[in-house]
Structures are given as C-alpha cells and as structure tokens.
Amino acid sequence: MGATFANLGNILVRLKGRFEIKDARADKVVAKVAFEDLPVLPGGTREIAAEWSGKLEAGTYVVIVLIDYGGRNLVAGQKTFKVGK
C-alpha cells in the first residue's frame, strides 16, 4: 500500500495516520496499518508505504489512507482494487 503526500505549506510537518482495507461489499474494515512521525519539508513530498502480510478472500476492496499532518482536518484518499480467486 502506498500514498504520496505533498507539503504545500511553509513549515515542516510530521505525518501520522493509517491505511484501512475495507471489504467493499460488506462495508467492513478487514485490516489497519498505522504509520507515524514521517517528516515532510516545506514544498516537499513524502511517499508513504505500508506492508500488510494478511490474506484477502476473492472480492472487491477499498484501501483508504487517513493522514494527520497537524492541520485542522485530516487528509484522505482511497482506491478500489480486486482480489481474484
């Protein structure tokens, strides 16, 4: 799993957050992977990578990333993917 964060501000930020994998059909979270203390310089970008060693049954899933950069709101993104038989 991975995501890219761009620091558009003028101060160093430190990221923390998590990736969640949801079963799209059941709308149920089946896995969570946390990250923390990832610095991003002003004007810089950070690739956020996480590994999860679990197994998913065949089906459609959504991976969601929730990022706390110290601002008023969280930043989030999502991507749908399928697991075959």
Image: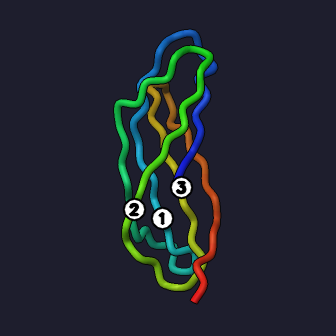
Q: Quadrant of the C terminus?
A: bottom right
Residue ID at (45%, 58%): 20
Q: Neighbour class for label 3 at 10 Å: few (<14), some, many (≥20)?
A: many
Q: Is the residue 49 above or below the residue 15 in the image?
A: below
Q: Amino acid at mark 1?
A: Ile
- Determine the secondary structure under disc 3: strand
Q: Nearer the viewer, residue 37 or 51?
A: 51
Q: Position of residue 46 (x, y in %)?
A: 54, 31
> Marks 1/3: CA distance?
6 Å
> What's under tag 3, amino acid-wise?
Ile
Where is mark 3, residue-wise? 64
Query: What is the spatial separation of the Cα atoms under label 1 and label 2, in whole angstroms?
Result: 10 Å
Report the disc number at residue 21.
1
Instruction: Say which element carries label 2.
Output: loop
Going from the N terminus, do you reach mark 1 or mark 3 first?
1
At label 2, counting other C-alpha atoms closer than 10 Å, the crowd grade (few under 14, some 14-19, many 20 or more) is: few
State yes or no: discs 1 and 3 in contact (Cβ < 8 Å).
yes
Q: Is 54 located above or below residue 33 in the figure?
A: below
Seen from this angle, which residue lies furthest top?
10
Among numbered discs 1 and 2, the one appearing first in the sequence: 1
Please report contact status of discs 3 and 2: CB closer than 8 Å, yes or no: no
Q: Amino acid at mark 2?
A: Trp
Neighbour tally class for label 1: few under 14, some 14-19, many 20 plus, Cα within 10 Å: many
Please provide percent x and percent y for residue 31. Answer: 39, 65
Q: Residue at x 35, y 37 (%)?
A: 36
Residue at position x 59%, y 27% from top?
45
Question: Is there a contact, CB below 8 Å, between mark 1 and mark 2?
Answer: yes
Instruction: Tell me what residue is drawn at x 57 percent, y 80 percent.
Output: 25
Q: Which residue is mark 2?
A: 52
Task: Of the two numbered discs 3 and 2 on the same chain, state the one appearing first in sequence.
Answer: 2
